[in-house]
């Protein structure tokens, strides 16, 4: 890595972000899908159930399904070869940081690691060394008072601020606007990572906003509690990030979404600190200020502390699974589960494409008995039950509660599934499918090594539109890919991940072999834009929990209406009149460099 400027820094912490995470891919540096010496796909490292295991069926699926030639390699640029532009200089700011003994650095790699999230755009840019505008200095607050001080410094010295939590954004929310001329501070919340107190009597917990999800959960577990919030990104995302994006977790059916868990929070903005006077389960005091902060994505200020509900660890945690003859049967089962309000902690339905991919990712068995059970199960499903291999779909579930509660939940769902031709798939398959979620995010990096571009995106939709939306969007992605010149088969799949009384969350997974295309990323953009238009036309939302950032900002007017956008702008103008928090997420501000108005 080269840079033509002097590195200036003070009291730089040893951050997990700089030591154990990839700089141009998902997750831990030692964890990735790779091709071993025998030509099979394996997973490296030691952090996941599939680590060190061989997946003998995945390479054939990967090559045939997406038309991949694994002899063709699209290597990523080495970090040492990436050229990073020097930062925008602001000597007054540097002096301010030194005088106030704030931890900071303008080191090129440190700036780079905080300049992006995990969209396909971010990964392509990093792999190709096409680095867009970076923040100019990284600052690590160690207390709420230091957050206030940093904001004061930015206001006094004409700087912008972009907060960063876990860096797992998939909306371009962390990108520095290329038109921003001021020096940009990346406010890294990593040092604000502590649980401040646990209230056993009221079942609440106060924690700093930079605490990573798995650390929060591990510490609560050691005291006999859980927060129940388990997004796919829990290993790396933070409490503050959950609040800022209105996040949702895989076990929301039992514990709720983040807006259901928040009891109290502190929010620091250029006008001061926003906080309610008391920490109570509910309050009637006009419009809820928390709802202004939830989902604000760093545009108004930064979350510093949060009080959340916690729950006693369940006596029993049990996995389960079902196999259905087709996606429609599975959706109808989910709809009935929702109408009866008998959903377990987690309930997720994969369509046929994802079911097949999940089977391809099964690890090799060392056990003759396990292999026999697998072959007998397949025979039972396909031959004896008459399910068609190209239509089968599967659901995974997690039950949590007392032994009696879990037994009752499992029995109710097993009996109900029979009404929709569902077959119980067993605990082992449910556990494997659920835990595979945390490793599957690494698949995109393997794909990119061989020319595949892929992404996931989500929506929420009423029950009566789920099937139509899923069918139309998948068909559109395949049709649009062909129209854009994609020569190979595409992955266009979906799954239902969260269940509500009035509808569900639907995830789409899309990937294609970009080999031979002059600009694969441009093709991807056109397809996803068309897919999002179709989602909205079919009655879906702009997003269920990923948020808006910059990537979905073009649909904000349609979603909220002109008066709603005017209200958001008025809030921004009141809380941050100088546009210090200038990440340009959600809305454009009249008079700012990135305004389109």
Image (cartoon, rainbow, N blue to C red):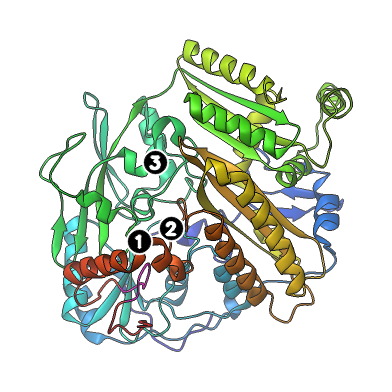
Query: What's the mark number on residue 433?
Result: none
In the displayed structure, would residue 32 be above or below residue 525? above
Q: Which secondary structure is most common in the magenta stretch?
A: loop
- Contact flag, marks 3 and 1 (Cβ < 8 Å): no
Q: Residue at x 72, y 25 (%)?
A: 421
Marks 3 and 2 sit apart, C-alpha to C-alpha, by 14 Å
Viewer-nearest residue: 134 or 523: 523
- Find numbered disc 3 in the image and state the secondary structure of the residue it sits on: loop
Please give the residue where the numbered disc 1 appears in the rendered image. Answer: 297
Marks 1 and 2 sit apart, C-alpha to C-alpha, by 8 Å
Viewer-nearest residue: 107 or 517: 517
Q: Residue at x 45, y 51 (%)?
A: 545
Give the mark, 3 or 1, whose residue is nearer the N terminus: 3
Query: Mark 3 Cα within 10 Å, few/some/many (few <14, many 20+)?
Result: many
Please give the residue where the numbered disc 3 appears in the rendered image. Answer: 257
Viewer-nearest residue: 290 or 137: 290
- Contact flag, marks 1 and 2 (Cβ < 8 Å): yes
Give the mark, 1 or 2, whose residue is nearer the N terminus: 1
Query: Mark 1 Cα within 10 Å, few/some/many (few <14, many 20+)?
Result: many
Image coords of residue 591 (percent x, y): 27, 84
Image coords of residue 557 (percent x, y): 39, 68
Give the mark, 3 or 2, whose residue is nearer the N terminus: 3
The magenta stretch spans which residues? 582-588
- Contact flag, marks 3 and 2 (Cβ < 8 Å): no
Please give the residue where the numbered disc 2 appears in the rendered image. Answer: 547
In the displayed structure, would residue 168 be above or below residue 325? below
Viewer-nearest residue: 485 or 88: 485
Q: Hey, which quadrant is residue 181 in on the image? A: bottom left
Marks 3 and 1 sit apart, C-alpha to C-alpha, by 16 Å
Residue 211 seen in the current view: yes
Image coords of residue 530 (percent x, y): 61, 67
- Find numbered disc 2 in the image and state the secondary structure of the residue it sits on: loop
């Amino acid at each position: 890595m080269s840079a033509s400027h002097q590195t200036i820094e003070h009291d730089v912490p040893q951050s997990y972000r700089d030591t154990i995470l990839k700089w141009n891919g998902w997750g831990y540096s030692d964890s990735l899908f790779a091709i071993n010496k025998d030509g099979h796909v394996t997973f490296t490292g030691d952090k996941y159930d599939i680590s060190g295991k061989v997946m003998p069926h995945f390479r054939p699926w990967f090559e045939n399904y997406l038309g991949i030639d694994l002899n063709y390699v699209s290597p990523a640029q080495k970090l040492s070869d990436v050229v990073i532009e020097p930062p925008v200089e602001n000597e007054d700011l540097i002096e301010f940081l030194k005088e106030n003994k704030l931890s900071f650095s303008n080191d090129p790699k440190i700036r780079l690691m905080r300049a992006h999230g995990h969209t396909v755009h971010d990964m392509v840019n990093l792999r190709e060394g096409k680095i867009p505008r970076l923040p100019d200095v990284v600052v690590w607050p160690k207390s709420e008072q230091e957050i206030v001080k940093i904001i004061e410094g930015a206001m006094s010295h004409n700087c912008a601020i972009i907060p960063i939590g876990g860096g797992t954004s998939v909306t371009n929310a962390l990108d520095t606007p290329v038109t921003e001329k001021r020096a940009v501070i990346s406010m890294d919340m990593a040092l604000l990572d502590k649980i401040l107190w646990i209230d056993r009597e009221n079942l609440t917990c106060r924690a700093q906003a930079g605490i990573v999800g798995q650390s929060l959960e591990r510490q609560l577990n050691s005291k006999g509690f859980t927060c129940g919030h388990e997004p796919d990104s829990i290993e790396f995302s933070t409490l503050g990030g959950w609040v800022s994006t209105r996040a949702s977790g895989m076990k929301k059916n039992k514990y709720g979404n983040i807006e259901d868990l928040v009891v109290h929070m502190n929010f620091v903005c250029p006008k001061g600190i926003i906080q309610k006077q008391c920490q109570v389960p509910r309050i009637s005091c006009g419009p809820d200020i928390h709802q202004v902060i939830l989902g604000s994505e760093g545009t108004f200020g930064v979350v510093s502390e949060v009080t959340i509900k916690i729950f006693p660890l369940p006596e029993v945690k049990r996995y389960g699974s079902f196999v259905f003859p087709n996606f429609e049967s599975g959706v109808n089962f989910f709809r009935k589960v929702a109408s009866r309000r008998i959903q377990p902690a987690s309930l997720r339905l994969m369509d046929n494409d994802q079911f097949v991919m999940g089977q391809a990712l099964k690890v090799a068995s060392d056990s003759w008995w396990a292999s026999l059970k697998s072959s007998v199960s397949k025979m039972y499903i396909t031959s004896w039950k008459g399910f068609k291999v190209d239509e089968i779909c599967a659901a995974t579930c997690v039950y949590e509660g007392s032994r009696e509660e879990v037994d009752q939940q499992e029995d109710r769902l097993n009996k109900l599934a029979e009404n929709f031709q569902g077959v119980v798939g067993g605990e082992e398959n449910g556990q494997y499918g659920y835990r595979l979620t945390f490793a599957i995010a690494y698949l995109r990096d393997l794909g990119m090594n061989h020319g595949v571009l892929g992404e996931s995106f989500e929506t929420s939709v009423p029950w009566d539109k789920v099937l139509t939306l899923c069918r139309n969007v998948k068909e559109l992605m395949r049709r649009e890919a062909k129209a854009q010149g994609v020569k190979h088969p595409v992955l266009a799949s979906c799954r239902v991940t969260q269940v509500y009384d009035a509808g569900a969350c639907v995830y789409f997974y899309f990937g294609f072999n970009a080999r031979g295309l002059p600009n694969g990323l441009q093709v991807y953009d056109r397809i996803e834009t068309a897919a999002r238009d179709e989602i909205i036309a079919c009655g879906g939302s702009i997003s269920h929990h990923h948020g808006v950032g910059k990537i979905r900002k073009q649909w904000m007017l349609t979603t909220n209406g002109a008066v709603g956008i005017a209200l958001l702008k008025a809030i921004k103008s009141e809380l941050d009149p100088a546009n210090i928090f200038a990440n340009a997420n959600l809305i454009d501000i009249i008079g700012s460099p990135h305004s389109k108005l």
